[in-house]
Amino acid sequence: MSLDVATADEVRGTVWIACVCERLLLASRLHTLDGEELARWLDLDERLRSPVDDPRASLRVRVGLTARVSLPATGEEAPARIVDVSAGGAFVETSLDARRGARLLVRVGPGRAGYEWRLPAEVVRDERERGPGVAVRWSGAPLVLRHHGTRDVASSASGGGR
């Protein structure tokens, strides 16, 4: 038997994507949170936010996560690498021709724990002069899938299902 050991970047990236997804899910139903959920959202919001009062200044973590991006409007899809992630968005290296304003779906995983995150995003900056990549802003509640062999369990802001 061989073991596949995660790199520090993979672990850090997975933890950050999970925190960002949890914050987005809670924020999507903020008006219906109970006391414990509201406390969790406030904790995540504080941890992921920068002390500076600028939405672009939120704490960014370099992660180097393998991902896939797609343009739902056209069905185009390409491999990607998430370079950094924050509570508000990410920088994604990809060859996909996505221009400012385009809606993307960023898929991460399934990783070693069996989770796959699908995050809706909007392109806010095209960085072609720096190389293939785009800056995105998270634009909705993510879908989180847990892979169990051939069965997937979905979770989303609407409660998900089986």
Image (tube, rainbow, N blue to C red):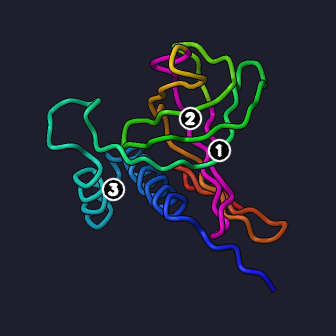
* Residue furthest left as drawn: 52
> Which tag, 2 or 3, sits closer to the chain's start?
3
Which image quadrant is residue 109 in?
A: bottom right
* Residue 12 at x, y percent in the picture: 45, 60
Disc 3 residue type (three-letter): Leu
Q: Give the range drawn in magenta.
A: 105-128
Residue at the limit of the structure toward the right, as seen here: 150
Front-lying residue, 61 or 104: 61
Q: Is residue 139 left or right of residue 36?
A: right
Q: Where is residue 81 in the image (x, y as percent from the top left)?
A: 60, 40
Spot the residue most to the front: 130
Locate the N terminus and report the quarter of the image it occupies.
bottom right
Q: How crowded is mark 3: few (under 14 residues within 10 Å), some or many (20 or more)?
A: some
Asked if marks 1 and 3 touch (Cβ < 8 Å), the reply is no
- Give the residue at mark 3: 33
Q: Does the magenta stretch include residue 156?
A: no
User: For the residue labelled by badge 2, is the local secondary structure a helix, a strand or a loop?
Assistant: strand
According to the picture, the residue beneath numbered tag 2 turns out to be 120
Q: Distance between the Cα atoms at labels 2 and 3?
A: 22 Å
